[in-house]
Image (cartoon, coloured by chain):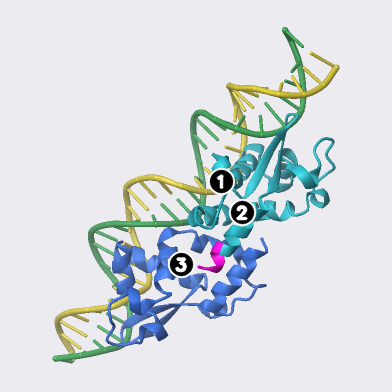
Chain colours: A blue, B cyan, C yellow, D green
Amino acid sequence: MSLAELTITDETLDLEGVLKALASTRRLQILEWLKDPTHHFPPQEHGDPDEHGACNLFIVDKLGVSQPAGSRHLKVLVDAGLVIATKRKGWTYYRRNEAALMSVAARVSSI
Amino acid sequence: MSLAELTITDETLDLEGVLKALASTRRLQILEWLKDPTHHFPPQEHGDPDEHGACNLFIVDKLGVSQPAGSRHLKVLVDAGLVIATKRKGWTYYRRNEAALMSVAARVSSI
DNA sequence: AGACGACATAACATGATAGTTATGTCGTTG
DNA sequence: CAACGACATAACTATCATGTTATGTCGTCT
């Protein structure tokens, strides 16, 4: 499912859905942190933070909510196509989908 | 309250609140219609559509929901500062707050 | 293979949204 | 001033969002 989302264009963008995904302090916070994973999260043994993003657990911890709650916020962002998940060695890393975020910004500009 | 909202700047903007207000098909539709009130709504006896916007009843009718539901959608947009209400001769007209919408677009660009 | 760690899923409580019908308020107009 | 029309508010219902704890699943490592 997220494959389709990865290729968000201005036409295929589900504006309401994306705005709902963004309309959350927690998720805006995550996106902000993911601008600079190395700076906002502890060092990771595996997976370059700047390449693959931050580990699920780090994000959840920093959010200060339970693990399921944090994971669901991440899922919302992934399902909306705004964040990309990479599974590796038992961990899941998340990074921003800059292309999608730019499409969203462009689309919002035309509201 | 809306007076403060009228002067949204990039700093005072409540991003989550504004995104919640926008994350609705009905309200996105209203904003779209209000880009060209004259074209989307019946002629009004009083109040120039392009100057003061469209009458509450017209918008509610076109939305196809009950009058209270429609009025509340408009209130959400007004409270978020995205739409400006003008009372006149017993009617209430609504128009886009272009400055606020531009601030929102700018802010979303920096997400 | 078995244990453990990372993450997802299930089940549930609670508060916010969005819709409805009924009723209030209040300025306009005859 | 009385009636009416425009809009707001109240009260209620259904659905969705967000949080919790408990439990599953599944890959990794010893």
Dot 1 and dot 2 residues touching (CB under 8 Å) = yes
Q: Quadrant of the N terminus of chain B?
A: top right
Q: Which residues are magenta?
A: B107-111
**Which residue was labeled with disc 2?**
B100
Circle 2 packing at 10 Å, graded few (<14), some (14-19), many (20+), is many
The answer to which of B2 and A17 lies nearer the viewer is B2
Image-based side of D21 in relation to B110, left or right: left
A43 up-or-down from B94: above or below:
below
Residue B109 is one of the magenta-drawn residues:
yes
Q: Are marks 1 and 3 on the same chain?
A: no
- Residue B54 at x, y percent in the picture: 75, 43
The residue type indicated by label 2 comes to Ala
Is circle 1 on the same chain as circle 2? Answer: yes
Residue depth check, mark 1 versus mark 3: number of the one nearer the observer: 1
* Residue denoted by label 3: A76
Residue D8 in percent (x, y) is at: 60, 32
Verify whether residue B53 appears in magenta. Answer: no
Determine the residue positioned at 82% across, 49% down. B38
- Predominant SS of the magenta segment: helix
**Displayed quadrant of residue B25:** bottom right
Question: On what subunit does the disc labeled 2 rest?
Answer: B
Residue drawn at x 44%, y 69% as measured from the top left? A31
Task: Identify the subunit bearing mark 1.
Answer: B
Per the rendering, the mark at residue A82 is none
Mark 1 lies on residue: B5
| Up-down relation of residue B22 to residue A77 (above or below) | above
